[in-house]
Amino acid sequence: MSSLSSPPYTGRFAPSPTGELHQGSLFTALASYLDARHCDGRWLVRMEDLDPPREQPGAASAILCALEAHQLYWDGEVMYQSQRLAAYSEALAQLTRAGHTYPCSCSRQRLKGLSAYDGHCRQHPPGNKTCALRLRIPAGEAGLEHYRDLWRGEQRQQLQTYPGDFVIKRKDGLYAYQLAVVVDDIAQGISHIIRGGDLLDSALRQRLLFRLLGANAPVMGHLPILVNGAGQKLSKQSFATPLDNKRAAANMEQALGQLGLPLPAELHGAPCDEQLQWASAHWRRARLPTAAHIQVGTA
Ligand code: GLU
Ligand code: ZN
């Protein structure tokens, strides 16, 4: 069957260099890689180095090293968000020209306890103070977003109710993750976003941004979150151990098992490239565990 009508598949892995990769990030990288390769798609890597205070020196190169050690080779050049400020500024100008932004000077103190932004600075323009910029969520139907997630099913939210007008440029002058990620997904022609379940909460507001920037939102799939024995998400904050590149094949075998693709006995102990070849052919979205959380290990 011809696939002329559907756009070519382009997926991506978009780590933030706040620390080294751990088993949870390998799980995410691998799922996006396999979904792309199974669909004969491209797989890109984007380094989300947008927030210098949160970054760890050397983490970006350590992440790329770990991907290579696991033979997760990406297509094209790595994109660095730190090099993309002009594009973010242009997108922001476009939104502002269309009346979709406004300045907000609300203090952390004022925002504390609000589950959704209450639109205070829409009514009370802050004047010349140092401000963040918020996206003005369109009223009524236009502020309602919905899509069917590959694993989490139908997602629907009136964005004025939650999260309310959200920040797209921070008070400290940094572009917000929500804006940068959408501008880059558009620029890179991303057709499929496969990523960690912790970002499900961002999906609908990002889809609104795609729309306001005149682009089609990609297909989205949010994976289960790997948690430790104490129920905490594996992350640098929960002291997840960095991947040991010398154990790449074993790490990958473990991640495949977590993705519902246990290696057949004859591939046990096989190098990463052989595992990847087998897994790309056998990847089925429906095999992924449907739980929102998967517990791994005990610590
Ligand atoms: N940089 C984000 C993170 O590491 C991921 C962004 C995304 O996949 O949209 O959590
Ligand atoms: Zn405000």
Image (cartoon, rainbow, N blue to C red):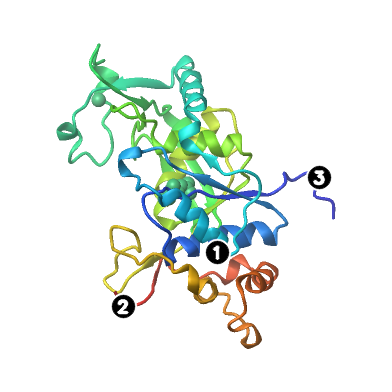
Q: Position of residue 223 (x, y in %)?
A: 48, 60
Mark 1 residue's CB less than 8 Å from ligand 1: no
Q: Nearer the viewer, mark 2 or mark 1?
A: 1
The residue tagged 3 is 4
Mark 3–mark 2 distance (CA, rounded to whole Å) = 48 Å
Pair 3/1: label in front: 1
**Residue 216 placement: quadrant:** top right
**Do the numbered discs 2 and 1 sit on residues whose CB atoms are within 8 Å?**
no
Q: Quadrant of the C terminus?
A: bottom left
The one of 59 and 51 positioned closer to us in this rendering: 59
Tag 3: residue type?
Answer: Leu
Q: Can you identify the residue that label 2 sits on?
A: 298
Q: What residue type is disc 1 on?
A: Ala
Q: Is residue 258 visible?
A: no
**Is residue 38 or residue 25 the one in the foreground?**
25
Q: Residues within 10 Å of mark 2 (few under 14, many from 20)?
A: few
Cα distance, mark 3 to mark 1? 36 Å
Task: Name the residue: 49% across, 72% down.
Answer: 246
Vertical position of residue 35 compared to residue 158: above or below: below
Sequence-wise, which precedes: disc 2 or disc 1?
1
**Image coordinates for residue 57, horizontal then vertical, percent:** 36, 47
Q: Around disc 1, counting alpha carbons within 10 Å, would you say few (fewer than 14), some (14 to 19), or many (20 or more)? A: some
Q: Which residue is mark 1?
A: 69
Residue 196, which numbered label?
Answer: none
Q: Earlier in the sequence, mark 3 or mark 2?
A: 3
